[in-house]
Each structure stands twice: as structure tokens, then as C-alpha cells.
Image: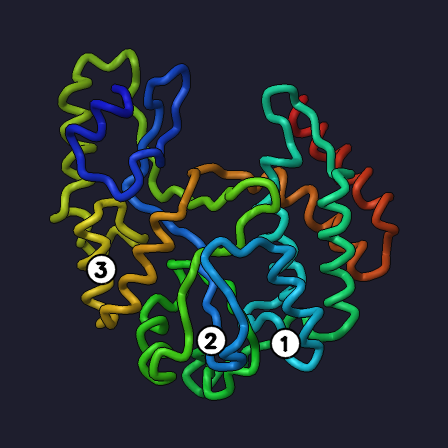
Amino acid sequence: LYIKSLRMRCQLKWYNITITLDGAIRGLPVGTVYNVMRYTNILDPGLKVDNDITWSKVLQIGLDHPEMPLFGMVTMDRELNVLTQLFEANIYDLINFEEKTANLHEPWFIELMEKLRTVDQQGNLVVEIPLDSNVMPNYDNLNFFFELLNTESQYASYSTVYKDTNGGVTVMPIPRGEKSSNRFAYAFRMYSISSNSRQQDVAWDLLESLLSYEAQTLYTLDSTPINIEAGQRHRQLQSFPEELNKQFDVVENEIDYLYDTSSYRIQAVPILYQYLTGGKTLDDALKEAEYEIWLLLNE
């Protein structure tokens, strides 16, 4: 099975969301989760924010507006969450997976980390979004520029917040990496067909049925549909206004890859976080994180 034949057989939202080796498909997801950024556009109408914004430009907004929190988040470890997404957006320009090396001492990444710490020390990197009596995010006071979310959490709230603010928030792609886009999605329920199978055609028919509109609109999918029409129907059921639906179309069109970098993130980000908290110098944190990544690459 090749990408071309896959496109002929199924109408996929992102046909490059596959695991491929030597040009052949080795794995195929039937669902996905992807990150988005919600921008409170009513805070500063003169602020120019577009879908190609990088992490350095986002952090610059924080530097230029010390009176206003840059991010709002419900989750615990909020600063760590911001650092995680910044690192993931740049990971493919810091790690050479073919040569099994990592260089976190790139000048542009050093500058990015220093800028992140400056905003954090300034006191406006991220603020907590309180929960209401129903343990739901309380958006009565949108006193922050951005919120980092994913399509797994509080999906219905996108429409509610959009309507309550009369379009005062915009859903947009997460910030891109400094050197390349690197916007990605996570796979849900990845399936593969054994090369030893005697019924590969039957197995493929099963996968094709799982990607059908009928299967992808089932709530038991428990993730964002891969099928284009099913994804649109998914949002219709949440009563998404037309303009908000278009914003999600843009987000989905900006997704570049499907990959799981969790093992590298889990090792590197807590070390880098110690630089933010003052526990390590930046050089020491980068060296230690590089070493941990090298161990993973060469194990």
C-alpha cells in the first residue's frame, strides 16, 4: 500500500498521517488529536497575529505587554506546559534522527529559551483559568492573549466561548517552529497489517470501513475524525458557527506531521524547565538534555 493508492481508496483529512518506511505505509490511524491555540483578539485590536506566527513572535508579545498575561491555562504545571509545546515545535530542527545526534546549543534556540525565561520572570507568561462550580473553565474574564488547547479537551467549549464573546476569540494553529513549521497531530488507534497475513485485502477493507463517514461519526471513536466529512459533521454536532468551523479548517490544513516525540520530550523538558526555575544555568540544562536525548537515540 502506497500513499497514492491510499488517496484513491479513502478520502482522508490528512493522507500523510501514516507511519511509512521505504515509501510503504506501515501504520494507519483511525482517529487523531491535534493542538490549537485560541487567541483573544479583543484585547488589542491593533495587534497583528497571523497563522504563521512563530514562538519567538508569541514571546515578543509577552515582552511588549508586561501588564497582560501571555497565556491562560486550566492545567497544573502551566509553565512546564508552555515549555513543552515550544520544545515540540522545534524538536525536528534540534534532533537529527538519521545521524542520532542532538544540538540544543543552536543560537536561535538559546535565544528562544532566554526570551521564554525573561517573560516568565517578568511575571506574565501564564495565568490560571479558574473553574466554575461545575468544574468547567470559567471564561468570564479573558485577561490573557492565548490559550493552548487540544481537540480532546472541552471540545464543546470552543463554540460556547466563541458565541459568548461574539467572535472575540480566534482559533488558530499552534505557533510554528523557528526554522520550520513542525505542526503535528497525535494518532489514536494506529493499525497495521501484518506482511504475513493471508487476508490482507480483507484487513484493508476493515481499515477502509473504519475510515468511512459512518464509522467516523460514531461517538465511540473518542477522538477527532480523520475522515474530512466526518470531521465537519463532528463540529456541526457541537453547533460550531460557520466562521469558527472555517478556523478549524485552517488549523487542520496547517498540520505537517504525525509523530510521537513523547520519549524525547519527557526526558528533555523537565531538565530545561530547571533553567526557567533557576535550578540550572542554560548551558548546563542544554548539555544535560542533549545527553539524555543522545542516550535515547542510541539505545
Identify whether 77 is placed above or below 225.
below
- Report the front residue among 278 and 194: 278
Which residue does the image show at 72% across and 59% down from the upper left? Answer: 116
Which residue does the image show at 19% across and 52% down from the upper left? Answer: 230
Give x and y (percent) for residue 298.
67, 22
The residue that label 1 is drawn on is 69
Q: Amino acid at mark 2?
A: Asn
Residue 30: image quadrant is top left
Which residue does the image show at 29% across and 35% down from the upper left? Answer: 15
Q: Amino acid at mark 3?
A: His
Q: Amino acid at mark 1?
A: Pro
Q: Is residue 219 left or right of residue 92?
A: left
Question: SS of the residue at dot 2?
Answer: loop
Residue 169: image quadrant is bottom left
Q: Is residue 118 left or right of residue 85?
A: right
- Pick whichever of labels 2 and 3 is earlier in the sequence: 2
Badge 1, how many Cα within 10 Å: few under 14, some, many 20+?
many
Give x and y (percent) for residue 191.
31, 32
The residue that label 3 is drawn on is 234
Residue 217: image quadrant is bottom left
Q: Is residue 176 left or right of residue 169?
A: right
Which residue does the image show at 32% across and 71% down from the upper left? Answer: 156
Give x and y (percent) for residue 41.
47, 75
The residue that label 2 is drawn on is 41
